[in-house]
Image: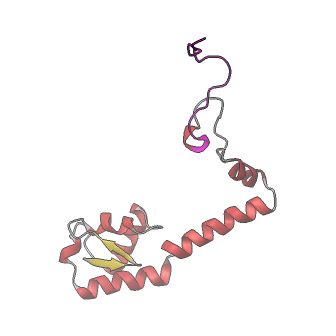
Amino acid sequence: MARIAGIVIPSEKQVQIGLTYVYGIGPKFARDILAEANIEPTTRVKDLTEAEEQKIREIIDANYTVEGDLQRLVTNNIKRLKDVNAYRGLRHKAGLPTRGQRTRTNARTRKGRAVSVGGSQPKSASKT
């Protein structure tokens, strides 16, 4: 059970897949890290030696911004956009897509559950 950047990497996964569990490391960065460390990407995490794990940790610490630092950076960037009232910041504030997607239809992930407007619901019968 390897622990890299504060994240426990699943033992049964291949190293190239396991590294992607760390926020900020995707498939490409995982391959780059393993190439720099001279580790076979298809090796299972449980088969890594302590020296190999340490080598991966050192490479990530030296060259990559991951986990809490990266999340803080992204949050600060969004906050800055909101503070200067940039268009993208306003879209973040309103909870709408920020990258030009259409909102007349779709965009449900950002906008949330659809709320119907108007008299489309049938009236419930009331006793009088």
Looking at the picture, how far across and down is residue 54, in whole percent?
Answer: 33, 86
- Along the line of sight, which residue is nearer the eye, 38 or 44? 44
Residue 115 colored in magenta in the image: yes
Q: How is the image coloured?
A: secondary structure
In which quadrant of the rendered view does residue 11 lie? bottom left
Q: Is residue 96 above or below residue 103?
A: below
**Which residue, as the protein is rendered here, is positioned at the far left?**
47
- 41 lies left or right of 110: left
User: Residue 101: which quarter of the image?
Assistant: top right
* Relative side of 63 to 9, left or right: right
| Residue that lies at the very extreme toward the front in this rendered image | 128
Majority secondary structure in the magenta region: loop
Q: Depth check: 26 or 80 in front?
A: 80
Q: Residue at x 59, y 44 (%)?
A: 110
Question: What residue appears at the point 33 percent right and 79 percent down from the top-left corner?
Answer: 3
Q: Is residue 1 magenta?
A: no
Measured from the top left, where is residue 77 in percent x and y?
Answer: 68, 65
Residue 30 position within the rendered picture, expressed as x and y whole percent measured from the top left:
38, 68
Q: Is residue 42 above or below residue 127?
A: below
Looking at the image, which is closer to me, 50 or 1?
1
Viewer can see residue 14: yes
- Residue at 39 percent across and 61 percent down: it is 27
Q: On the rendered image, what quadrant is the C terminus found in?
A: top right
Count all numbered tags in the image, as a single digit. Answer: 0
Q: In the rendered image, which quarter contains the N terminus?
A: bottom left
Residue 66 seen in render:
no
Left or right: where does residue 49 sit relative to residue 119? left
Give the farthest residue toward the right. Answer: 84
The magenta region covers: 110-128
Residue 76: percent from left, percent from top = 67, 69
